[in-house]
Image (cartoon, helix red, strand yellow):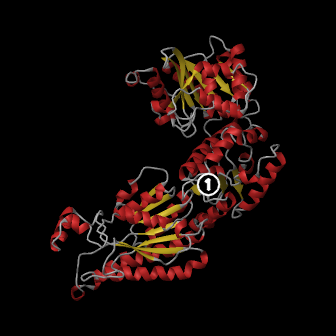
Amino acid sequence: MKSLWNDQEASAFSSDLAQCVYASRLLGQEKTLVLHGGGNTSVKSRERNIFGEEEDILYVKGSGWDLAKIEAAGFAPVRLAHLLRLTTLDSLTDKQWANELNRSVTDLAAPPVSVEAMLHALLPEKYVFHTHSDALLTLTNTPQGAERIQELYGKTVILVPYTRPGFPLAKCAAQLFRTAMQEKTIGVVLMRHGLFTFGETAKIAYERMLALVSQAENYLEEHGAWQITISPLPLSAALSAKPLRQEIATFRQAISKVAGFPVILATHNDAEASSFVRHADVATLSQQGPVTPDHVIRTKRVPLLGKDVESYRIAYETYFKEHSKRTELSLTMLDPAPRVILDAELGLLTVGRNAQEANIVHDMYRHTMAIILRATALEKYQAQPITDVFDVEYWELEQAKLHLKQNLPMFAGEIALVTGAASGIGKACVESFLARGAAVVGLDINPAIEKLFDRPDFLGIRCNLTSESEIYQALDKTAKTFGGIDMLVLNAGIFPSAKRIDSLSLDEWRKIMNINLDSNLIVMREVYPFLKAAPKRGRVSIIGSKNVPAPGPGAAAYSASKAALNQLARVAALEWGKDGIRLNILHPNAVFDTGLWTEELLQARAAHYGLTVEAYKTNNVMQIEVTSRDVAELAAEMCGPLFAKTTAAQVPIDGGNERVI
């Protein structure tokens, strides 16, 4: 493992905490060291309190921060003496432990304190770094793991047997450090958890981490257990050629039913994932338990074409009924849905309440696959006993986190598809659905759609909506990325220059109909199976036009296309109602903050009516301006619970138009 430390770069990070930030970011760049930005780092400092007294402060990385992107604000300052004094106690309940951690914080604006803060406090030197190195976890997850660690490192590391995180681990470590710490000790290995290194400078602690991890990687390399090659079982040509988007959506519906809420289902069938799920021994390899009980990922291997999720739920609940000694734990608190599904046909599937959670699960399982395969090649993969996994998952502090997650956004776990999403009303719709917790797919012919938002819950796809093949490809990508479609916003369309009927060519007419009507028919037809499989029933918001109830001269093709779309939506409401799918239509007018309206055009149109630009924008009964965001917010709300019993409604959003009224 190569050091990324650059003395010139590091010199720009002048304070002790800044040096910790710099080293943390370097560690965060090494994907074999951290699980989705995980691990933690710390630095000890001496500061004056409000009374002018000097006290020792431990700045420890707060929960929720990504090491690769961490800032100084991501560290929680805690009183070192208070933490150390806690280890002198014989016992602490989980609640007391959490309370005392919080009491030790000197800044209420700081992020939550890591439960591993005590270990950072106990280790003697200024900088302490902790990672979940793949190489170390490979060694510790073998039957002879402890012996291998001692053989490899000797007295340079202290080996701590697996102990549940929190006060029990802190107490165990405190006793070991008092008796085993030597001058040449540079690290601590926690069995089935990770590696700590420390030093008086950030550079020393960082390079010790890399040195110890490199030793483990070299050991695996020497034993033929680092570079793993798999010969997967073949997949039949009939299955590999099969379009699977509808099957993915139906599978997501089943998983959501088991979970009790909508989920994101991300599909990964690259070479690495496909090789693992079609490994000859995957049924054994994948069911042996997590790499560390702190990172529990419920994994289900489903047989080819036999995705029996319900049997998984029953087996899972039966297991915990038999093993739970906590009689107050209600099964209603359990989320029985698997987080990873291994399917020979579909690949590696990861499940989350939102796109970010599904991504985290994916990252974690990528590490898990590598560790399992390397440990198997070295000796045998052996996880911690399932009772320890249960103790961590239903640990009081973990249950507190679970309760915090109950207050979810309106569209958590759901997916919205928005057409014409690169600008104007479409872009505003993307923002409105994202703000309500949905994952959003935006389609647009403008390639800017692909980089519209850089976040895990948005997928921008360049798509010509008049091309059936491009729509199929976009829906395939949507299904693989998020698992389905729950809500559809039909927004894409064009407003041509004014032309009277007596000068309107058939080609111009057909072009408008093709974009404003035919493309919407294709999208509706192809999205219907997704909407039918939506866990909370499908919803459609259609961006119509004032021209439907009140057409204007010179807009024959546009008005006719929008009126036809309006009728198409009404028929769909009749046909799809039995499936619980609802469709509602918005009729906006005079929305000027879109790409269609330049300042020059606004001035010209205002002058045509003898108005100022401001008066032209508010030329309606209520004398108010209607914006893209106004339309988008209504489109999103129409997919929410307030409109749960409404379908085929036509709602104007125009400030009041005399011709419509």
Decide if residue 544 is on the left or right side of residue 306.
Answer: left
Q: Is residue 584 above or below residue 147?
A: below
Q: Quadrant of residue 183?
A: top right
Q: Position of residue 493 (x, y in %)?
A: 35, 72
Q: Height in image: 148 above or below 391?
A: above
Q: Is residue 375 above or below residue 297?
A: above
> In the structure shown, which secondary structural element does the residue marked by tag 1 occupy?
strand
Amino acid beneath label 1 = Leu
Q: Inspect this view and state whether residue 314 appears.
A: yes
Q: 473 or 297, which is in the foreground?
A: 297
Viewer-closest of 458 and 274: 458
The C terminus lies in which quarter of the figure?
Answer: bottom left
* Residue neighbourhood size for the residue with mark 1, other residues' Cα within 10 Å, grouped as few (<14), some (14–19), many (≥20): many
Percent position (x, y) of residue 178? 70, 14
User: Residue at label 1?
Assistant: 349
Q: Residue at x 38, y 25 (%)?
A: 9
Who is closer to the viewer here, 651 or 255?
651
Residue that appears at 73% across and 21% down? 89
Residue positioned most to the top: 183
What is the x, y in percent for residue 553?
A: 25, 83
User: Count the marks: how many?
Assistant: 1
Horizontal and vertical percent for residue 79?
57, 22
